[in-house]
Structure formats: C-alpha cells, structure tokens
C-alpha cells in the first residue's frame, strides 16, 4: 500500500510539490491540520475526487470500455491493440489498465479519508458540512463498490495511513459490502433534501443518487459470489425510495437521453447521477475531456473543411444477439434489416459509419459490423468536436445510474421475492418508453401496397396527418420497384406529436407547377412515375402519359414516363404493443429481465457485472461463443477478433487480477484465483 499512499498524497488538490516531496525536510507541504479550515477548502478537496472519477483510468475510458467490451452485447473488433487494452481476455496482472482502476480508486479513498478526518475542524455552516460529508461518505463507499465488483476481496482503508503501513490483508467481500452500505446509509441521512431538482444538475451526489446506487449494491450482493438472496428485499426498499420520491421519471424519447449528454443538457429526472466532463454547469466539477463516444461509438474521421465531422475510433461492435433481441416488424419487407418498433435498436445498433472526403454516411449491412451508437459525438458542440480538423476535448458525461435501471432492478427484485405479478408494472414502463408510447400512440409500421415500377433511385417517403408529427421512413428499391419501407422514426415523441389515427404515406416527389426540376429527378403525377430527362421549370400543365406517349415537354423541362407510382399505408400503435406477455413463470420473467436490461442498458458498462451476478458468466459466454461462431461472427464479414476474445474466457475472468505492483508492495495481499 506504500505507493498508493504516496500517490494519494500527490493527488490532494495540488497541495504538494513533486520537486520537494522526497526531501527530508518539507517546506511547502500543507498538512491536513493547516488546510481544512474553510468551506471552500472542503469543497476543493471534494471536487478533486469528483474530477478524478473522470480520469482515463476510470470513467473517461477504462470503466466503460476496457474490461466490459467482451460479452454477448458488445465485442472488440481489434486484434493486437485490443489485447493491449484488455479487450479480448488476454491480459494479465501486469497490464497497466488492470492497475489503473485499483490505483485511482485508492487515491480517491485516501483523499476522502483525509477529508472526513478533518471535516469537523472547518468553520462552516452545519448544513453545508453535512452535504459535503454525505457526498464524501457516499463516494468512499462507491470507490469500494468499484473495487470489490472488479477485484473481489480488497483491503479496507478507513483512515489515513502512515508511510510505513504497507502490509494489509484483504477484507472478505461480505465485509466490504457491509462497509459500503454503512457509508452510503449515513450519506443518505446527511443528504436529506439535497436533490438534483433543486440544484438543476446531477453530476454531484444527491439523496436519490445514494438510494439508487444502494439498490445496485444490494442487487450485486444478492448475486454471485455472495448469493445473499435476503438482499433482494433491500433492493425493493431502496428502489421504492427513488420511485416514490416523485423526483425521477423516464424521458419520453430514449434517444434524447443520450443526445442531452452530448449537448451539455441536464436531464435530472432520467439521469439520477452522471459524472461530469467538459461543459459541466458553472460551479460543478468537471474534467477537460474523455473517450466516451470514441472507442464505443460510431466511426468517424475528422475533416478539416467539415465542421460537422468528429473523431471516433469505434473499436467495438454490437453483437448479432443484441440486435436480434430487439423486436422486428415481421411484416416489414425492408432489406437488409426489417424495421423495429423498438426505437432503442436503431439508436444503439447504428447501421452506418462516417467516412470519405467529403465525409458522408456509409451503410453497414452486416449485422456483426454495426456501430455502437448510444453515445454519439456528432451531437457535441461544434467548437468541441472539430477545431480545424483537430480533435477537441469531448464533453459527454457518463450516466452512472438512470431511472430505467431503477425500474428494472425493482422488477427483478419483485419477481424474486413475490413472483412476476407486480413486477410487470416496472418492466412495462421501460418497454413503453422504448416503443415510443409512454405518452401516446405512434406509427407502428408502414406497409407497401403497390411496389410500382421504373424506379432508378430510392424515392423520398413522407408521412403526414393522423394528428401527429415526426414519423420518418426511407424506401428500399430493387428491380425498379419499391420493395420495402424502413420506418426510421415512429414520431417526434413530444407533447402534441402523437398520432390519433393512421397518417397518410406518400412515396416520391409530387409534380408541382412552377417548380424547377433537375435532370434525372423522378416525380409522381397521379399514378404515373416520370424521370426528368431535361432540366427546366414546370408550368401548370402536368405531363400526361397515354399509350405510345413517352415524354412531355413543359417550358423547357422534359418528363419521360418511367413507370407506375408505388403506394403504402401506415398503422399506428394501440398503446399495448410494448407490454411483456402475461403469464410468465418466475423463471421466464427473470430471463425476460435479462434481455430487457441488455436492450435498455447496453454499452453502459453493466452487462458483464450482470452476467457475473447471475452466476454463470463463463458458461453463458461459452454458449454464446458457440452460437456466434455458428452464426457468422468468425467470417471475414463478421467479427473474428471479437469471437476469438470470447473463446479466451475462462473461470479466472470473473474477477480482475490484483495488480502486480500492489502484490509486490503489500505482502499480505493474496492474488485472485487463476492469476
């Protein structure tokens, strides 16, 4: 622990000098007794800990990427460099990223211990002292939650250590959980009335953040390896506190939750706690940038002349299993993918990248090579994402816990304790939002009635009427016909935009008097499709098609008959399509929860921990690896690198190894099994 202590001291809000740290007589070291005197100094110490959460070793990169990208929802597409980052289960205890999580969790713990030991010495209003102390206690518990979730048994350090206190045995995980809960429960009391709705932002800890994370702690405690199933009752207790607070709700548009994260917009109802980055609200701790949306994102290169461009490496791809877990419209005829009534699918599994000069969307048609689209840098402020073709400091906050997770935890615990009866209430709220019908009905599907003939380019599709707005679709053509309509958005999902009846679908651009047309455009007039063979402006006399007539000139424009116009109809939802089928057994409902958590929370660094706590991580991944190999993952058009990573998984990967450097310092520490 010696090196940990040294690093912790160096991290304390810039209070030491590297130059003189090792001098036998220190002249510029501010001791805790001399420092923690004012509210500003307490807050500065706390801010330093918040800021360190957005380090590359933690949430700016590693926590959402390095050791969580090899599961049934997300796989690395990298070879050797993927191994160097721990993406394909080829790492060992010496890997720098293995050490980084351990090191900076203990840096935070050391700084928090010093703050808590000295907080009562400061001259500060008692209410403010309680708020700072509550956040500090929670954060200490949260660091230990990260440590025990990743490494199992870890040393519990609850005070500042002397420089010679090196050897310290690990506390069994049960004892670590007990300390986490003790710290967080005290924090819950101290933070009474401290809410994100009052603050207007959510990148500091509030009372409902404590309660939501406590529910997650109990959920993990209930699962493998502790398997203390009495803790499911505590999950119910703490999720109910969040739900019944009335402070949180689902945003009606799933996509907007993540757009807001990119645009520095706080959604304090949906996002219960997020970790701040560049662009945080005035007075809120933040870091200058991160890799969120980079390694896990939609591939894009910077183009100096294109201010809309951004940089993203996209070193991971969603799995076919994740994509196919979302419902598809069985009647839809679009290719290569059918439309989905679940708006989460096309947001999370984007079927394009950005490439070329000029930069443009490039379609991805293989289900193993789609983009992880949840965190989208294209929505970041232009000044951040592209400065004369040089990547800026990306600003996306990390959503530690969202209200939808609280509802799904509540459903899972309810099902375990009481069976699925009342659990439907919670999972169906998440599903209704996913289908866009939280607050009204939307367009459910678009069906081609007449495929038409003569199409050389995909026509535009316009959806109007029906009392709503915002539904969009694209046409798919083959052999000169419109063979399918892909519903890209069911509606705007805001008040006043929902549909009360089926809207009208128009395929193609209608002929309009006085409009200037360009060559090769295709326009519709009545049931006829025309191609503009000579550019010009149309008059009030439309072109006509009769037997033997192939073209008509109208004030310089020449319209050549191409074929017949395609038609389609739309249907809207009735408000129940999203509901999970009734009558599930307890076991079947638990399986439904597992799939729903993947659909809702993919790429938020929770899937691997979920699979571990459900008790069969290795077996589940071996089964999935066999399925993936049989379903195209290993092909050249699939994700052979990701498949190889899956095939590397063994029992030792349930936990990370304890870092080599720490084992060399702390002789009482025992390495995890298999390492």
Image (cartoon, rainbow, N blue to C red):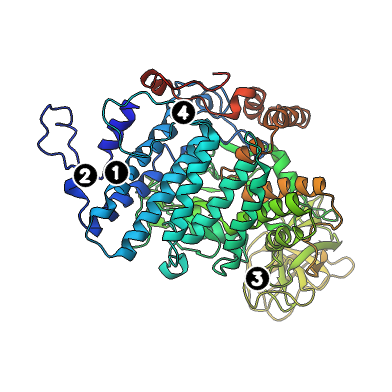
Mark 2 neighbour density, 10 Å: few (under 14) some (14–19) many (20 or more): some
Mark 3 against mark 4, which lies toward the viewer?
4
For the N terminus, the image quarter is: top left
The disc, 1 or 3, on the residue closer to the chain's N-terminal end is 1
- What's the CA distance linking mark 3 and mark 4? 85 Å
- What's the CA distance linking mark 2 and mark 4? 27 Å
Q: Do labels 2 and 1 touch, CB within 8 Å?
A: yes
**Left or right: 500 as drawn, with respect to 360:** right
- The answer to whether residue 350 is visible is no
Q: Do labels 2 and 3 touch, CB within 8 Å?
A: no
Residue reaching furthest to the right? 547
As drawn, the label of residue 556 is 3
> Disc 2 designates what residue?
32
Pick the front one: 282 or 244: 244
The disc, 3 or 4, on the residue closer to the chain's N-terminal end is 4
**Quick one: SS at disc 4?**
loop
**Quick one: SS at disc 1?**
helix
- What's the CA distance linking mark 1 and mark 3? 82 Å
Mark 1 neighbour density, 10 Å: few (under 14) some (14–19) many (20 or more): many
Residue at image coords 56%, 56% = 402
Residue at image coords 34%, 45% = 112
Mark 3 neighbour density, 10 Å: few (under 14) some (14–19) many (20 or more): some
- What's the CA distance linking mark 2 and mark 1? 7 Å
Residue 60, x across and y down, in percent: 43, 43
Quarter of the rendering containing residue 314? top right
> Disc 4 designates what residue?
170
- The answer to whether residue 469 is visible is yes
> Disc 1 designates what residue?
114
């Amino acid at each position: 622990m010696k090196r940990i202590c040294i690093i912790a001291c160096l991290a304390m809000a810039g209070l030491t000098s590297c130059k003189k740290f090792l001098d036998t007589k220190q002249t510029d070291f501010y001791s805790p007794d001399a420092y923690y005197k004012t509210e500003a100094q307490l807050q500065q110490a706390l801010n330093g800990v918040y800021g360190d959460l957005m380090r590359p070793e933690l949430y700016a990169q590693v926590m959402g990427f390095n050791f969580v990208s090899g599961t049934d929802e997300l796989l690395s597409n990298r070879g050797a460099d993927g191994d160097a980052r721990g993406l394909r289960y080829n790492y060992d205890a010496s890997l720098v990223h293995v050490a980084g999580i351990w090191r900076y969790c203990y840096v935070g713990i050391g700084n928090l211990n010093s703050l808590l030991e000295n907080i009562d010495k400061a001259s500060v209003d008692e209410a403010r002292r309680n708020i700072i102390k509550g956040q500090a206690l929670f954060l200490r518990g949260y660091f230990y939650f990260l440590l025990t979730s990743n490494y199992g048994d870890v040393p519990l350090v609850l005070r500042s250590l002397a420089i010679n206190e090196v050897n310290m045995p690990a506390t069994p995980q049960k004892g670590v959980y007990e300390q986490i809960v003790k710290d967080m429960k005290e924090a819950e009391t101290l933070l009474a009335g401290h809410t994100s709705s009052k603050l207007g932002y959510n990148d500091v800890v509030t009372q409902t953040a404590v309660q939501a994370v406590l529910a997650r702690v109990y959920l993990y405690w209930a699962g493998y390896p502790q398997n203390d199933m009495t803790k499911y009752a505590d999950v119910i207790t703490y999720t109910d506190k969040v739900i019944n607070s009335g402070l949180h709700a689902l945003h009606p548009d799933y996509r907007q939750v993540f757009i807001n994260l990119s645009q520095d917009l706080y959604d304090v109802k949906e996002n219960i706690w997020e970790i701040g980055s560049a662009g945080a609200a005035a007075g809120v701790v933040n870091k200058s940038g991160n890799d969120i949306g980079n390694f896990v994102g939609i591939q894009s290169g910077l183009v100096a002349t294109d201010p809309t461009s951004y940089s993203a490496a996209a070193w991971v791809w969603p799995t076919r299993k994740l994509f196919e877990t979302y419902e598809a419209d069985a009647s839809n005829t679009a290719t290569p993918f059918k439309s989905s009534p679940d708006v989460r699918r096309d947001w999370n599994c984007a079927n394009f990248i950005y490439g070329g000069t000029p930069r443009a969307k490039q379609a991805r048609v293989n289900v193993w090579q789609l983009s992880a689209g949840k965190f989208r840098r294209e929505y970041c402020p232009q000044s951040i994402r592209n400065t004369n073709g040089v990547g800026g400091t990306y600003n996306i906050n990390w959503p530690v816990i969202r209200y939808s997770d609280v509802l799904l935890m509540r459903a899972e615990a309810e099902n375990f304790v009481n069976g699925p009866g009342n659990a439907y209430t919670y999972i169906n709220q998440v599903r209704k939002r996913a289908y866009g019908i939280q607050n009204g009905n939307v367009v459910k599907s678009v069906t081609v009635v007449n495929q038409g003939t003569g199409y050389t380019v995909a026509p535009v599709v316009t959806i109007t009427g029906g009392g709503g707005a915002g539904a969009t679709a694209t046409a798919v053509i083959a052999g000169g016909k419109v063979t399918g309509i892909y519903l890209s958005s069911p509606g705007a999902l805001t008040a006043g935009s929902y549909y009360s009846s089926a809207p009208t679908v128009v395929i193609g651009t209608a002929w309009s008097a006085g409009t200037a047309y360009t060559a090769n455009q295709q326009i519709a007039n009545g049931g006829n499709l025309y191609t503009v063979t000579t550019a010009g402006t149309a008059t009030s006399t439309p072109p006509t098609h009769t037997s033997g007539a192939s073209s008509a000139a109208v004030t310089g424009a020449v319209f050549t008959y191409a074929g017949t116009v395609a038609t389609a109809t739309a249907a809207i939802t009735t408000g129940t399509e999203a509901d999970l089928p009734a009558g599930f057994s307890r076991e079947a409902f638990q399986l439904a929860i597992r799939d729903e958590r993947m659909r809702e929370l993919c790429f938020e660094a929770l899937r691997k921990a979920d699979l571990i706590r459900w008790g069969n991580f290795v077996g589940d991944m071996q089964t999935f690896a066999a399925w993936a190999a049989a379903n195209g993952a290993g092909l050249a058009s699939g994700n052979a690198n990701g498949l190889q990573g899956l095939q590397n998984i063994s029992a030792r990967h349930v936990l990370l190894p304890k870092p080599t450097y720490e084992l060399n310092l702390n002789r009482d520490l025992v390495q995890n099994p298999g390492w």
